[in-house]
Image: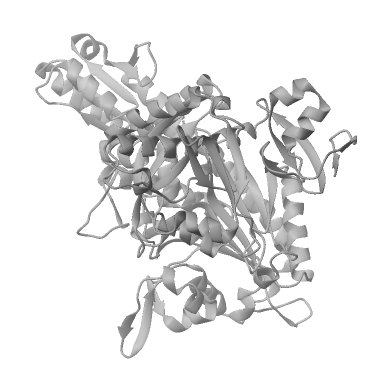
Amino acid sequence: MMVVLPDGRKLELQSGATAADAAKAIGPGLAKAAIGAIVNGELYDLLKPLPPKAELRILTEKDPEYAQLFRHTLAHVMAQAVRELYTERGYKPEEVKLAIGPVIENGFYYDIDAPEPIREEDLPIIEEKMRRIVAADLPLERFVLPREEALKRYAGVDPYKTELIQDLPESEELSFYRQGDDTYGFTDLCRGPHVPSTGRIPPHFKLTGIAGAYWRGDSSRPMLQRIYGIAFRTKEELEHYLWQQEEAKRRDHRRLGAELDLFTISEEVGKGLPLWLPRGAFIRKQMEDYMYKKEQEHGYHYVYTPHIANARLYYTSGHLPYYKDDMYAPIEIEGEEYYLKPMNCPHHHMIYKARPKSYRDLPLRLAEFGTVYRFELSGTLSGLTRARGFTQNDAHIYCSRAQVTEEFIRVIQLFDEVYKDFGISDYWFRLSLPDFENNPEKFGEENDNWRDSIKAIRAALEETGAKYVEGIGEATFYGPKLDVQIRSVLGKEDTIATNQLDFIVPERFGLEFTNEKGEKETPVVIHRAIMGSFDRFFAFYLEHTAGDFPLWLSPIQAVIVPIADRHLEYAQKVAAEMRKNKLRVEIDDRSERMNAKIRDAELQKIPLILVVGDKEAEAGAVNVRERHVKEQRTLAIAALIDEMKQRIEARK
């Protein structure tokens, strides 16, 4: 068989040769360093036979693919360790039934059906056994069994492996990996790839937790226990990841929302239906007022739409029947069905349709802070990031095809302005494109609608110089979309907002305008949400700032701490002057020690703490302690007010 190397050289190998054989043929140094290979673009281990024609690149422990190999083998090592644990407790190895154990981002897991529950306190014991297996440097061996023999191996012993084998196509090769031997080892049904021996696994791994997982994700099937682990090439990578996780817990918007009295979720109200507490509601109102003013400056017209609509509207839009499972159950009113609205778009289309339109009316930009309701599964709900009721910063732009590029330019510029004001710089756009070749059922055939739309959005991105990437196959069925990708302070990438170009739904609703020639024409619709939903954006921003809101957004901008009761009158005078200038201030007049009051204000992440005593009252000033600033300052009341107003105006 012939193998082609990255430099174009050809290597003649015997039929059935592996990447290990190829590495040996190249040289002893590479044979020793080899850990796996890329074969025709696919990750192989050193144990799997190469195909007859192969383009091959040998991998070493310096290559990023190394992590996928050792993480996969660690899943097997963990399964072996769990079986050892239960064997020591008097169970037979086969009584620990194993489902699946894949690689995931930063680590691995294994779904296990154990004879008695695995406990959190078992994890250090399992981890120690794993380290012994790694230190034993057990060699891995790959072998293949006929289907009948493979089924016989698991018959009456492991229903999960039996089901996996039965569901595989007849043509599928059934490969197994064995580490060690019958005395000290483990064998599992597996496609691979793996490292050649357990000794090639770096010691920088940790088991992180146990969770329940239904077999094959089906709630009607058995509940298994999933053990999670993380693994990295270096100690520094592991420590950095663990720091990130602790920081993520510290910044979790659900935790901060409770600590800072921002929002709550009540079982009596319902899962996924957040309640905004006064402080959180104030911040949200500030965000809404900001967006209202900003969008008016950009030529948007605000509208209001009801929270329910007749089912006929959603049949026209296509939400029914295709989106029905994600909608709340219908309400019957006077013999007709009504639904809580899952999206604002159909309502806005009817507003557009309410009056005849001319080309002179376009572009028409309709905006709404529209609350929508979606029936998300309870297991997917997560604070404000995944809720059943939320309010979108929604807008729909109705324009001619010739206006699409200019409108997208304006949308991109609006994103830049808003995100800059909120101190968000690490974001970019993702142009989601169709994949006509591999998914014709979703996207249909390539036509002028698709070509013109993609060309228009690309032109807007190039004109603005926006940073963007492209994603093939990620478009909606009705047009390309422009997602806004954002990176959190912990480095996690997420989609915060989506803009979609729609040339299909306007036709379904019969939307039209009269063009310059007096002819009827169908407009194009741009679905646009700068903040996505206020709820989700608030959650991201809360984690982004760790609750340290800038002065302009803070519900309490300053707290005045009188040193003694006799300073309370002066504190009230300072507060009155600040409130007269529309500054948000509170007085801490509790009978607590001054240091306790300062500590409590710091825990509430209030930007400014103003201490007043005899000296300050005599000078008509305040002692200013600013959050995250070591130096204290003494400022006259007027100077403090001027400084705060300037910072608020600059959104700092």
Q: Foreground: 611 or 27? A: 27
In the rendered view, would you say 82 is above or below 216?
above
Q: Position of residue 350 (x, y in %)?
A: 52, 77
Q: Is residue 457 left or right of residue 320?
A: right
Decide if residue 342 is on the left or right side of residue 165: left
Q: Position of residue 232 (x, y in %)?
A: 53, 28
Mark yes or no: residue 584 visible: no
Against 67, is 308 above or below? Answer: below
- Residue 508 in the image: state x and y as whole percent: 60, 80
Q: Residue at x 35, y 45 (%)?
A: 211
Whether residue 43 is visible: yes
Residue at coordinates 76% horizontally, 20% vertically from top-left? 29
Residue 124 horizontal side relative to residue 180, left or right: left
Q: Quadrant of the N terminus?
A: top right
Question: Which residue is at the front of the view, 415 or 473?
Answer: 473
Q: Residue at x 65, y 65 (%)?
A: 363
Task: Report the label total.
Answer: 0
User: What residue appears at the point 61 percent right and 45 percent down from the top-left corner?
Assistant: 143
Instruction: Name the residue furthest top.
Output: 615
**Closer to us: 140 or 77:** 140
